[in-house]
Amino acid sequence: MIKIKFHGHSCFEIFSGDSNLIIDPWLSDNPLADIKPDDVKAKYILVSHGHSDHFGDALEIAKQNDGTIIAPFELATFCEQRGAAAHPMQIGGGYSFDFGHLKLTLALHGSGLIDGENIIYTGNPCGFLIQIDGKTIYHAGDTGLFGDMKLIGDKYNIDAALLPIGDNFVMGIDDAVTAVDFLKPKIAVPMHYNTFEVIKQDPNDFKIKVESKKLAEVKILQPGESVEI
Ligand code: NI
Ligand code: MN
């Protein structure tokens, strides 16, 4: 049994046996977060791209837990330069960790890290395809809809797809419904909405559209809530 716990925006923890991963750990400045960085016990910190609403507290959490940040090469290198352990990867590449297998997937988005008046280049943004304990979880990161989601859906039997629906910076609801059609997950969980005014969405609209087409079951999670797969 795997537990996927939502912490607001795009942050999720995945619990499986002794393993505890956290994805896109933006907590201290996240108005929706139900926990603080100090509360996190994670051996691996997966970061999809350099934007602050995803990179968030990754460095602090990694250092506190003797954990490893897994991120695209340039972002992982940035983390190493700031004293955190990191495992660099790139899109299309997979690696077997002690928790299971992780592959980085395409994401149509940007990834610069804003540092005062400078923008630090942190490589390409990504999504995560996580195979853990016989289950497959897809966290899309920040992305627009892309046709290769169909390839991912054809090739992998996805148990849970965590998909942005906020529009403006990422997929809106209609494109996210198409993403569910392409990915064919058992469960779809909406993310990256209602944190700011510009990404205000009604997740029930997503749920009704997906479930009326019988594409998947949609689980709307409030921060602090979990789904088990
Ligand atoms: Ni972003
Ligand atoms: Mn974002």
Image (tube, rainbow, N blue to C red):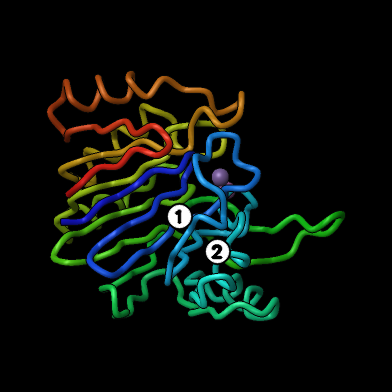
Q: Residue at x 63, y 74 (%)?
A: 79
Of pointers 1 and 2, the one earlier in the residue sequence: 1
Instruction: Identify the element where label 1 is drawn.
Output: loop
Q: Of the residues shown, which amino acid type is indicated by label 1?
A: Ala
Question: Residue 93's mark?
Answer: none
Q: As drawn, is 221 to the left or to the right of 66?
A: left
Determine the CA span between mark 1 and mark 2.
Answer: 8 Å
Q: x%, y% of residue 165?
A: 42, 33
Q: Residue at x 57, y 70 (%)?
A: 64
Q: x%, y% of residue 59?
A: 62, 67
In the rendered view of the protein, which quadrant contains the N terminus?
bottom left
Q: As drawn, is 5 to the left or to the right of 78?
A: left
Residue carrying label 1: 107
- Placement of 38 over or under 99, stated as above or below: above
Q: Is mark 2 within 8 Å of ligand 1?
A: no
Residue carrying label 2: 124
Viewer-closest of 170 and 102: 102
Q: Of the residues shown, which amino acid type is indicated by label 2?
A: Asn
Q: As drawn, is 14 to the left or to the right of 182?
A: right
Q: Residues within 10 Å of mark 2 (few under 14, many from 20)?
A: many
Q: Are marks 1 and 2 in contact (CB under 8 Å)?
A: yes
Q: Which residue occupies the extreme front position in the image?
A: 39
Q: As drawn, is 134 to the left or to the right of 79?
A: left
Q: Residue at x 57, y 48 (%)?
A: 27
Query: In terms of image quadrants, where is residue 18?
Result: bottom left
